[in-house]
Amino acid sequence: MPNNKRKKKSENLGIALNAAITFSGIILLGFIYSFSQNQLHDGVEIKPINTNISSQPVLAKDIYLQNPIENIKVEVLNGCGVYALASKTTEFLRTKQIDVINSDNADHHNYKKTLIIQRNEKVKSLKKIVETFGVYLTDSTRIQILPDESLGVDVTVILGQDYTSFAELNNYISANY
């Protein structure tokens, strides 16, 4: 009887081993087929077009020196409900090398006037944004100082219904959308 059990275990082991070898063979054949298909692929050749050939490579440093990014962190909030206004204004500010880190809707869409809110002690950031929008630094109806370091921004811009009064922004939106 013990001989019979060993024989049965040996047969079961042989069947399992044959199944594993067969499975491995099928997988191997699949890899070989896939590899051969990739090697035989007749794709369309893409020829590089280099219109601006220069003997000197352009370095990232040189690009940055030509268009430096201001060290200003801004959030832009849509406070008037115009579709995608915060997104469009974000693009406008980025053309001015201003780092917009948040673009979203404001807490409501009933802002009559655009607000520019200074969130920390970086007055230079506020001056740059005010200059970009063409607002006077003394305009207390538009400029507020409400420190909130937890936001992680220097300036918050809440776009109001008067956003069309900012000529440069309005021209950018008209030209690009």
Image (tube, rainbow, N blue to C red):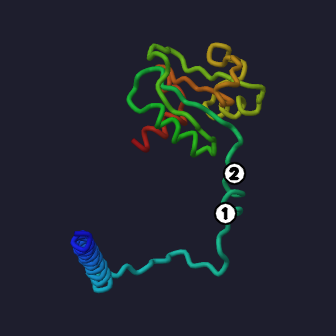
* Total numbered badges shown on the rendered structure: 2
The residue positioned 41% from the left and 33% from the top of the image is: 84
Where is residue 53? Give x, y as percent: 57, 79
Where is residue 87? Give x, y as percent: 47, 36
Residue 7, above or below 161: below
Where disc 2 sits, the SS reads loop
- Calculate the distance from the C-alpha at mark 1 to the C-alpha at mark 2: 11 Å
Where is residue 92? Give x, y as percent: 53, 40
Q: Amino acid at mark 2?
A: Pro
* Residue sitting nearer the eye, 44 or 166: 44
The residue positioned 67% from the left and 77% from the top of the image is: 56
Which mark is on residue 42?
none
Give the quadrant of the C terminus: top left
Where disc 1 sits, the SS reads helix
Give the quadrant of the N terminus: bottom left
Residue 86, above or below 140: below
Query: For mark 1, what is the residue?
Result: 60
The residue positioned 72% from the left and 30% from the top of the image is: 127
Query: For mark 2, what is the residue?
Result: 68
The answer to which quarter of the image holds residue 94 is top right
Asked whether residue 35 is in view, the answer is yes
* Residue sitting nearer the eye, 107 or 32: 32
Is 122 left, or right, of 163 in this rendering?
right
Q: Residues within 10 Å of mark 2 (few under 14, many from 20)?
A: few
Q: Amino acid at mark 1?
A: Ala
Q: Nearer the viewer, mark 1 or mark 2?
A: 1
Indicate which disc, 1 or 2, sits on the residue closer to the N terminus: 1
